[in-house]
Image (cartoon, rainbow, N blue to C red):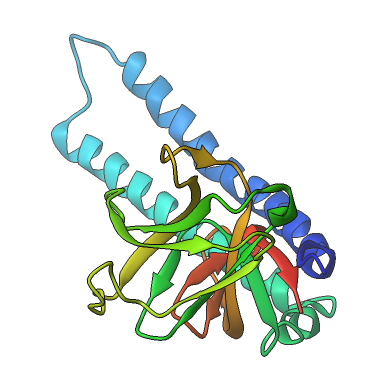
Amino acid sequence: MDVASIMGANSSTSQAQISNVSQDFETFLRMLTTQIQNQDPLSPMAADQFASQLASFSMVEQQTLTNQKLDILASAFGAGGIKAYASVVGRFALHEGPFDFTGAEITLEIADINELDGDVKLVILDSRGAVVSQAALAAGQSRVTWNGTDSEGRIVAPATYTAEIRRVADETNIDVRIATGDLVEEVRFGATQVELLLANGTVVPETAITTLR
């Protein structure tokens, strides 16, 4: 089940509200820019006046950011939105891309694995792209559990990692979808989007969730 079907309406409403809120800030910015461009070079704006304008500019910017956050919260808690988000907590969410290792085993699900032959392996890479661990895959194997150890059997440091499928013979990267996931423990309302905190420590934007179980 796609998480967008649960929370899509709230996201579109929030984006429209953010667009409206930012209009005041953009108008103020244009006014300040026009004032500077058209000031008399023989009688420029006094330093104290200019400082006052910049202070006002900063205040408008901060107020705009505050309003954006309030709009997101209002959208989430209004029109039954909080019920939709509450229903996500405790469910198993799958996402593609980087994942956080915090000490617990990581389960990886591989799509279209039946199209691959047996000459492939799963490779775990760190944030620099260096290979941390690898394991051969049997033909048709669609799920792998990584226990957090490197190629020497040592537990790796808690960090963000990625996974790839490569051919054993020539290390060619095979373009297949690899998803990881865990139970949703918390829903966080950020400045511009909603994020889900998973039990393994990974924080995922709601738009990155591919499946809810």
Q: In this view, does 34 lie above or below 146?
A: above
Q: Which residue lies furthest to the left in this view?
A: 47
Q: Residue at x 21, y 10 (%)?
A: 41
> Where residue 13 sits in the image (x, y, percent)?
77, 58
Nearer-the-camera pick, 152 or 79:
152
| Left or right for 43, reference 185 | left
> Where residue 186 sits in the image (x, y, percent)?
57, 84
| Left or right for 6, reference 55 | right
| Left or right for 76, reference 35 | right
Q: Which residue is drawn at 65% across and 69% down?
A: 94
> Where residue 156 sits in the image (x, y, percent)?
25, 74
Q: Quadrant of the N terminus?
A: bottom right
> Where residue 123 sits in the image (x, y, percent)?
42, 56
Residue 158 visible in image: yes
Q: Residue at x 79, y 61 (%)?
A: 8
Nearer-the-camera pick, 131 or 101:
131
Residue 194 visible in image: no
Q: In this view, does 88 lie above or below 72?
A: below
The answer to which image quadrant residue 36 occupies is: top left
Nearer-the-camera pick, 53 or 194:
194
Q: In this view, does 122 lie above or below 100?
A: above
